[in-house]
Image (cartoon, rainbow, N blue to C red):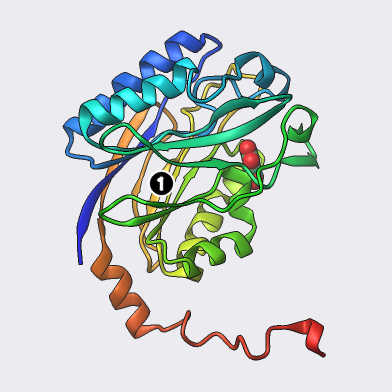
Amino acid sequence: MGKCKLAVCQINVTADKRFNINNARDVVFRAASQGAQIVLLPEMFNCPYETSLFPDYAESYPDGETVQMLSRVAAELGIVLVGGSIPERDGDIVYNTCFVFGQQGGLLGRHRKMHLFDVDLPDLNVQESSTLGPGRDFTVVDAGICKIGVMICFDVRFPELARLLALAGVDMLLIPAAFNMVTGPAHWDLTMRMRAVDNQVYVAAASPARDEQAEYVTYGHSMVVDPWGTVVAQAGTGEEIIVAEVNLETIREVRERLPLLAQRRTDLYDLCKK
Ligand SMILES: O=C(O)CCC(=O)C(=O)O
């Protein structure tokens, strides 16, 4: 069973789309120079996280400048690039989409955020569905060295999705995300670690760096969690690359000693039968 190096890039995101694209490119180069074979970028890395701005920053596949950059950089560096997310326009609908490119620059997968972040909390009202449409497809990417399941931010709160991806055989859940100063301190570590423990997979989440002046202040603290739930790497709040080794043997060992997936009582779980 194999090992690989995963880099999670916590990057600055500004109102300047061109800056964001160039900065992401530079940071991915730095991550690859540290030996990373798989590189993960944050949610909405080419656009401030403001629902009203998503349509203005949106672009289409394959002609958009951000996706073109991601494909070129993946090929140039010979890495698997899990390109965070960007607003993607398809006809009349804008999606919150993660494009994954392979070592030759080809598209390996595309995840459109399934669960839109519509919440009304004290000090936080976000209605993604005011400008975005929800995705419908599960995204499992065969990256050669390992199988990757992709979820975007709020998707992580739905254990069903992570479980379906685990049952489909993924070794890691890669999550472009942008928690905030209300839900981040309360739930970021807990949720990421829980999805790893539930499913005995690696979990990595990439956040934009924190900008205190932004309308939506992101939490930061990008992290990598191993299948035992241990946080093996974690960023602070500024721009930072964290690198971790992913060891597929660790997944096998944890599952052998604590066989959660095998001990599920699927014979009892169908409530409709009662
Ligand atoms: O689930 C959360 O607390 C944050 C979700 C979020 O920020 C998002 O989905 O963009």
**Vertical comparison of 190 with 98: above or below:** below
What percent of the width, then of the height, locates residue 195? 51, 62
Please state which of residues 215 and 9 is positioned toward the viewer in this rendering.
Answer: 9
Please state which of residues 177 and 148 is positioned toward the viewer in this rendering.
Answer: 148
The reply, left or right, for residue 204 in relation to residue 47 is left
What percent of the width, then of the height, locates residue 166? 48, 66
The reply, left or right, for residue 264 in relation to residue 122 is left
Q: Which residue is mark 1?
A: 223
Task: Provide the secondary structure element on which disc 1 rests.
Answer: strand
State the residue at coordinates (51%, 62%): 165
Which quadrant, please, contains the N terminus? bottom left
Report which quarter residue 273 is drawn in: bottom right
Which quadrant, please, contains the C terminus? bottom right
**Vertical comparison of 12 with 161: above or below:** above
Task: Give, as a three-letter code, the residue at label 1.
Answer: Met
State the residue at coordinates (24%, 69%): 249
The reply, left or right, for residue 262 in relation to residue 187 is left
Q: How many marks?
A: 1
What percent of the width, then of the height, locates residue 154? 63, 46
Report which quarter residue 247 is drawn in: bottom left
Q: Is residue 124 visible?
A: no
